[in-house]
Amino acid sequence: MQGKLILSDGTVFLGQSFGAENPTSGEVVFNTSMVGYPESLTDPSYFGQILVLTYPLQGSYGIPQVKYWESAKIQVKGLIVSNYINQPSHFESQQSLGDWLKEQGVPALFGTDTRMLTRKLREHGVMLGRIELKAKSGKLKANEIYDPNKENILPYVSRGKAETYGEGKKNIVLIDCGTKENIVRSLVKRGARVTRVPWNLDPLVEKLDFDGVLVSNGPGDPSQAKQTIANVKAMLDKNIPIFGICLGSQIMALAAGGKTYKLKFGHRGQNQPVQDIKTGKAIITSQNHGFAVDTKSLPGDWQEWFINLNDRTNEGVRHKTKPFMAVQFHPEANPGPVDGGYLFDEFLTYL
Amino acid sequence: MNKLRKVLVLGSGALKIGEAGEFDYSGSQALKALKEEGVEAVLINPNIATIQTSKDLAKKIYFLPVTPYFVKQVIAKEKPDGIFLSFGGQTALNCGLALEKEGIFKKEGVKVLGSPVKSIEVTEDRELFAKELDKIGVKVPKGGFAKTLKEALKIGGKLGYPLLIRSGFSLGGLGSGVINNKEEFVKMVTVALKQAPQIAIEEYLKHWKEVEYEVVRDKAGNKITVCNMENLDPLGIHTGESIVVAPSQTLNNYQYHYLRKLSLKAIEHLGIVGECNIQFALNPDNNDYRVIEVNARLSRSSALASKATGYPLAYIAAKLALGYKLPELKNSVTLSTSAFFEPALDYLVVKIPRWDLQKFVGAKQQIGSEMKSVGEVMAIGRSFPEVLQKAIRMLETGQDGLLQNGADDTQLLPTTERLFSIAQNLSRGETVEAIYKATGIDPWFLHQIEEIVEFEKSLQFSVISYQTISQAKKLGFSDRVIARYLKATEGKIREFRKKHGIVPKVKHIDTLAAEYPAKTNYLYLTYHGEESEVVTTGYSLPSTANKRKPEAGSRKAVVLGSGPYRIGSSVEFDWCSVTCAQTLRSKGLETIIINCNPETVSTDYDSADKLYFEQLTFERVSDIYEIENSSCHPEGAERPEEGNVALVLSFGGQVPNNLALACFKAGYKILGTSPESIDNAEDRNKFSKLLDKLGIKQPAWQSLKTLDEALKFAKTIGYPVLIRPSYVLSGSAMNVAYSGQDLKVFLENATSVSAEYPVVISKFVEGAKEIEIDGVGQDGSLLIYAIAEHVENAGVHSGDATIVLPPQKLYLETVRKIKYATRQIIKSLKINGPFNIQFLAKGNEIQVIELNLRASRSFPFVSKVTGFNFVEIATKVMLGGQLSGYFRTIDLDYVAVKAPQFSFSRIKGADPRLRVEMSSTGEVACFGDDLQEAYLKSLLAVGFKLPKKGVLLAIGGDKNKLDMLLSAKFLTGLGLKLFTTDNTHKFLKQNGIKSSRVYKISERKHASVLDLLQKGQVDLVINISDGGGQRKETDGFIIRRNCVDLGIPLVTNLQAAELLVSSLSSKKLEDLEIKSWDEYVSS
């Protein structure tokens, strides 16, 4: 079936449907990864977004068992690719990408000039857009499109109740703002116990017994997560070791009194170079964010930790004396390079 | 950073199988990086056809062998403070390791830049390597190492069969293979241990995937993987023989990043500084892996990765070797982002190797763990079918698609034609599963191939419609194939496409998948897209910024490159293309290059204003011509100005030259000599008539369509006769027949390869000298020329001949006659550009055998030897410049010799005798104060070793024996022991020369010739056969083949043998002067 993606500026991109056949709308963003579509599609940070994958072949190795996903379902609103591979080949494949999308009710288009679309988003900045599968054109009115930045969307991606993983002595409270499963796996693998709590749960109020806190990744505009920001601020005041990842990093910056801002088209990919400005050491990281921390807005006892070598934006901040660390990228990887995994070890030394 | 003053760069010498044009690319980039840093570069590389040995890149160039002896001499003379070992392939690396062992670097205070020698040693010694990786828990194949057959048998017994053997210090996997039983094992181990001191015996990981990563690390330990690549062929097929795709297609996120992590871990442990390549085997049924090898240097794979990603690996590696850290360097494509990043591709590439096995008598089509391919192509696109079909056409093997291409072997063996066999099998309804089981090629690839096959099958039932054509183009079908099925012409399909807007779109390679804009114009075309990207015209490269500002509406020139390297067309045409492009740019033209060979400098995106990494087919050239023409909008003009784009077809060898007439008929503007004149030179009938009219002699010939006609004509002119197809490149299917029987046998081969063209039979003149004239005509007059003579008499292909410039043995009368004939030809064809004519001379009679109205293989040689850049001059002439001047090219104070490089050791079972069919894979040229000095240097540069012990003389025919008599005397005078067989022994004895008699193999007595060779009692073999093309000559073949397999220098040509002996008699190694290019040729 013929379908189209209509951007908020009226531009229309054609494609063929290979997912569910219902219309959808959201913020259109692009990711430049060459592998990892099952991980990306289940990454809750993409909630509310239509994902454009720039690598032209998608679906090649099918979809693995749910235990390899980053959450229990597909999180994106829609998917746009250039070529869809309907005959996957991999020993872990359980079903094809198209069947999975259909099963999960997520529309998808192939045959679209994704490079043209990406260039458009790069020049213009991310835009809202809608996938339509019936012949209907014309300029979209803004109110017809879902904008994930206009509300607090953490309730949609965070688990409703607390859950514990691992057997370790040290307990880490993971504030689930839409956490990727691999954050849990990364901590448990290193011998920690993880108590995963909903986005708005205050561990101090609940009197949990814990040694440190990890504020997870998640979708949307960080300033919408007011409750989480307040909870984190309380813990900062108590000098509890805290590690923030992606949205968690932005929430920590906001809790510390700093500011965040929206990037033109964000960083989404597995090839983002960051440098520890103190040691000069550089690593390649996996990223997926549309907002960034404004380093200059931070109080004087915080310092810039990592910067992006491409556009010099902030990629991590830490407190000069206290055990507060935050990175904009994804040390847990999945998808992407695992170079930043050492940061979990570093965090565990604080506990 | 300690400021370096002078750095010595080692090149890789002649192109050979396993070590080819990729090292011109890497060496050139290293020199560019040095130049940028203001470091004086001294280059040793005898490969005169390379771009790195052009003026301007290195401060000083030595056309000398890359061997420890010569490098030592150059170090003593130049006193460099640093040396680059990793840009000249295995040749440079091995040379460096030997010098380190001798303590030369320490003694002379030369710092090895880049990866420390210790790291290199670990990666080169398989045993050390396994030990080191074991330390960090990284797995390598199970097995062991053996120095003797006994040790090998012990390990083999433990592992069981099948197993794999590999030898260390090898380029391209020489002496490696899958062994199925003990008998094979004993045989292979024996041969391999002759080539290398130690071999590895390993578990055979049948049908595991082969995956490679290109890794870059700086001295501070910052590291990235620039590209990963997956072989379509499973483990067991050498990566140089495999179809390769980048990025990997069948690896999921876990596998991709797990292998990436292991790569970084291994490279960190080994302490690499710069670039290296790591190869993995990956079990397709789980995530088990092995590290197969690490190459601690730039490699063929790294050249491919550079072109596949746009990341200039060699340039960055050079900068890192000079002490930079990755985060300090910029991305050369965006010029804004960091060089510390991993390219994100929004396209895919496929590499297919090019083989030329039909050029070797006795070669097998089977491929395996040893490299036999001579070149490769890389196709870029946005779907696998599109890219695969592009790549097939790029090979220039006459194959235009997967089916209907003349390949009818449906056996699923790993052969050079396997892709076509698979397609045939799928077409006949064989299942993907069954083919996977038989070949180990991942079903993913097979499904993609199946999609092409299914569509191709359906095409015959289709009609011309938007849907069909659009789908066909997305799947990579050419207009020609579509036309064939739809019973239309190529032109009609094109017309329909353009009318309906089915045209390819231009896309950039920007390294970041459109996340940041590219400042360079590295382009490809695809049918998977809506938008053609606007290309910045008049873009200036950082190095030439502000130097040049093309005026609005200034003309554009499109230079066509040479396509894949093959026997008869390689780096020399890349030098020609790049030199032409440089000249065009210096003249203010917007310069565009089209080429598809990842081993070249012409496909560096800064060699021209724009690079289209594309096919050199008429269809694609037309696409690009039209795209470029339509974007020629001078200020204020509404329509593009006609003729604003011109094609340059004269510098990429025969491939672009063959397009001349079609482009001309299509109305495209072509620079240089008129395509009608080109046709007059290429068409034998027309050319022959012209020669007759001019009164210039040529060997009697006729074009014949049947065997009977041929036999009749051959009888009239008398044997021997030469047989060849009409459009000839490197003598494909050429042969000499000495009898009617010979002719019958050959004709069956020759006609089968050239059904469209009749076979040409001409008189083969025996005992004639062959002379070439390269030059440039200007509006029909001779502007500049160089005359060179072959050492070997006619009968050896000009590409295999040893060539001397200026000529040393030509009569003045002959030279005068050649010049006169040349002038007449140039005038009558109104030549305006480069040309090459080949002459035969016997006595003072000359005959013309061939005219090429394009730059020839010897253009870089004559340019660099005479000091006049023939390509630059030709380009200026083609642009309409009126040049004049006197060019001294004959009376020179030095001599240069161009010698061929053979790769027979790679081609099992091939007969290494020189013939009319070309079989050399590369060449070198060296200078000397006389012929003998230049000849010895050039021989040493292609791997010849001076004899110290004994010489085997196996001379067939009475005349040859007589001619060799003096040489035999000289050899004994040098203190070398002579060994001879029956007749030669008697003949020498009669003439008072002592020699030890050994038995022929056919005599079945000992000590036989074979014993002599295998025991290493001789270190030179002179084997001259007595005429006779196809004549059975088993003994001679066994002698020659054993020389190749055992690495014993072999001479098979009488004139070459005579020159060798006279050179050995007049010069010792120490007599060979260490002089740089500019000490010979002043400019």
Image (cartoon, rainbow, N blue to C red):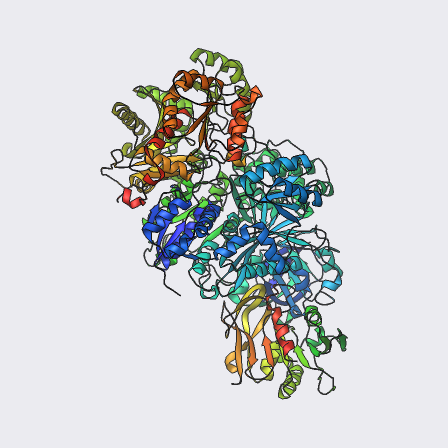
Residue B575 locus on image (x, y percent): 39, 43
Could you tell me which quadrant the C terminus of chain B lies in?
Answer: top left
Q: Quadrant of residue B454?
A: top right
Residue B486 locus on image (x, y percent): 61, 35
Q: Quadrant of residue B542?
A: bottom left
Q: Is residue B1081 visible?
A: yes
The answer to whether residue B238 is above or below residue B713 is below
Residue B802 locus on image (x, y percent): 39, 31
Q: Is residue B189 left or right of residue B728?
A: right
Residue B231 locus on image (x, y percent): 61, 47
Q: Using the image as rendered, state which of residue A46 and residue B364 is in the foreground.
A: B364
How many numbered marks have been drawn onto this rendered protein structure? Answer: 0
Q: Is residue A272 left or right of residue B202?
A: left
Could you tell me which quadrant the N terminus of chain B lies in?
Answer: bottom left
Q: Is residue B870 visible?
A: no
Residue for point 71% across, 79% down: A170
Q: Is residue B1048 left or right of residue B968?
A: right
The answer to whether residue A251 is above or below residue B856 is below
Q: Using the image as rendered, state which of residue A67 and residue B313 is in the foreground.
A: B313
Residue for point 66% across, 82% down: A228
